Image (cartoon, coloured by chain):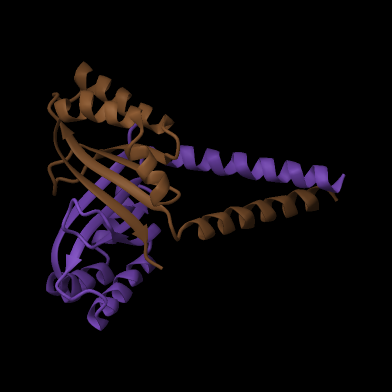
Chain colours: A purple, B brown
């Protein structure tokens, strides 16, 4: 009896998770930036910048924050940043949040050599 | 008793899911392409191309296939494609799969106006 109820719990959990994802997709925005730094590879300055960028994850509204290495030889960028917002309003709040504005002014414009912003919405 | 076991099931399911994700991240590659088409917006030709690109999801090794609209005004691309591979070997198999090669030759090179490929790995 215990194992059957555990099984039902697992199934219920899976269904609930999928329903939540499907319902939330319509307005969701995935914001991505691919970039390369002025700093040399594996330098302390590079590490310091990456640590600073990770703090953006704490800004309200930021979901699924991912900091990644860009490994394709077919573009010039070294890193990729990805985050999701529930909707345009949450994205706007992030953009105008003092911590985001301070990061852009104090770090991004000074230390980033080149970048490309990409915003994505799932096709219905 | 039933509800307690259901609760345990839900918790177990959540933990198992997170462990699987965390363990699989080291070698995983997210392959992305942002692109714009030669076809005009909302044309039957555009829809036909998007339907063809969706079939790439059936190629072995392709995981988390997503076809998205690119909505940022800060780049020239209209769509984004994202898929994940368990490792470089799975990615290589996709690249050399006959269905992928046929799609690139018969559709991609003829109908895509411009594109950028991005390959990402989570930073450890």
Give coordinates of residue B65: x percent, y percent.
Answer: 40, 38
A11 to the left or right of B95 = right
Using the rendered view, name the quadrant where residue B121 is placed.
bottom left
Query: Can you say whether B107 is above or below B20 in the image?
Result: above
The quadrant in which the C terminus of chain B is found is: bottom left
A72 to the left or right of B84 = left
Query: Can you say whether A97 is above or below B11 in the image?
Result: below
Give coordinates of residue B58: x percent, y percent.
Answer: 43, 30
Residue at 16% in and 73% down: A111
Residue at 30% in and 37% down: B68
Q: Which of B40 and A74 is in front in this view?
A: A74
Query: Can you say whether B123 is above or below B42 in the image?
Result: below
**Residue most extreme to the top:** B44
Using the rendered view, name the quadrant where residue A13 is placed.
top right
Residue at 18% in and 65% down: A36
Question: Total number of numbered labels?
Answer: 0
Using the rendered view, name the quadrant where residue A106 is placed.
bottom left
Residue at 81% in and 42% down: A4
Residue B121 shows in this picture: yes
Give coordinates of residue B99: x percent, y percent.
Answer: 34, 27
């Amino acid at each position: 009896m215990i194992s059957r109820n555990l099984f039902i719990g697992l199934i219920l959990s899976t269904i609930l998770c999928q329903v939540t994802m499907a319902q939330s997709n319509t307005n969701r925005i995935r914001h991505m930036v691919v970039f390369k730094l002025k700093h040399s590879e594996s330098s302390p300055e590079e590490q310091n910048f990456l640590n600073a960028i990770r703090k953006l994850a704490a800004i309200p509204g930021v979901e699924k924050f991912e900091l990644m290495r860009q490994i394709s030889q077919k573009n010039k960028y070294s890193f990729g940043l990805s985050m999701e917002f529930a909707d345009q309003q949450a994205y706007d709040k992030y953009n105008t949040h003092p911590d985001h504005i301070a990061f852009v002014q104090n770090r991004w414009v000074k230390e980033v050599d080149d970048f490309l912003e990409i915003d994505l919405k799932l096709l219905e």
